[in-house]
Image: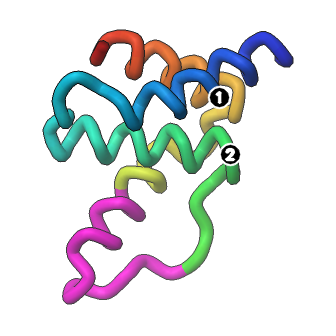
Amino acid sequence: MAKLKTAFDKAVAESKQLPEKPDNMTLLKIYALYKQATEGDCEGKRPGFTDMVGRAKYDAWAAIKGKSSEAAMQEYVDLIESLK
């Protein structure tokens, strides 16, 4: 787990220095995997229809509900590696 956490932390830092900005769907996946890895399952009320960005982020995070933090970390690391 410590090795995965180190790789995850490194990927988080690298995600801010990607050669080009990923498309919105990829950004939502990055966001959702990060939140799942660091906070666990999505909780709380879904944002209203006037908050489109918040709603999209909530939906992306809620879509991976139940995924373990280790699995989310590994997917996050793999995704960032593929974008470099």
Query: In the rendered picture of this protein, how many numbered marks are placed on residues?
Result: 2
**Residue 32's spot in the image, x, y percent?**
45, 46
Q: Which residue is painted at 53% across and 33% down in the image?
A: 12
The disc label shown at residue 9, or none: 1
Instruction: Decide which of 72, 23 is in the foreground and name it.
Output: 23
**For mark 2, does the 10 Å Cα neighbourhood hold few (<14), some (14 to 19), or many (20 or more) residues?**
few
Q: Which residue is painted at 34% across and 72% down in the image?
A: 54
* The C terminus: image quadrant: top left
Circle 2 is placed at which residue position?
Answer: 38
Q: Is residue 52 above or below residue 8?
A: below
Magenta residues span 45-59
Earlier along the polypeptide chain: callout 2 or callout 1?
1
**Residue 43's spot in the image, x, y percent?**
61, 68
Residue 13 falls within the magenta-colored stretch: no
Decide if residue 79 is on the left or right side of residue 76.
left
SS for callout 1? helix
CA gap between label 2 and label 1 equals: 11 Å
Q: Is residue 29 above or below residue 35?
A: above
**Residue 58's spot in the image, x, y percent?**
41, 64
Q: Which residue is painted at 14% across and 38% down in the image?
A: 23
- Which quadrant would residue 20 be assigned to in this image? top left
Q: Which residue is painted at 40% across and 21% down in the image?
A: 80
SS for callout 2? helix
Instruction: Decide which of 71, 4 is in the foreground and name it.
Output: 4
**Residue 7's spot in the image, x, y percent?**
65, 16
Report the mark closest to the observer, 2 or 1.
1
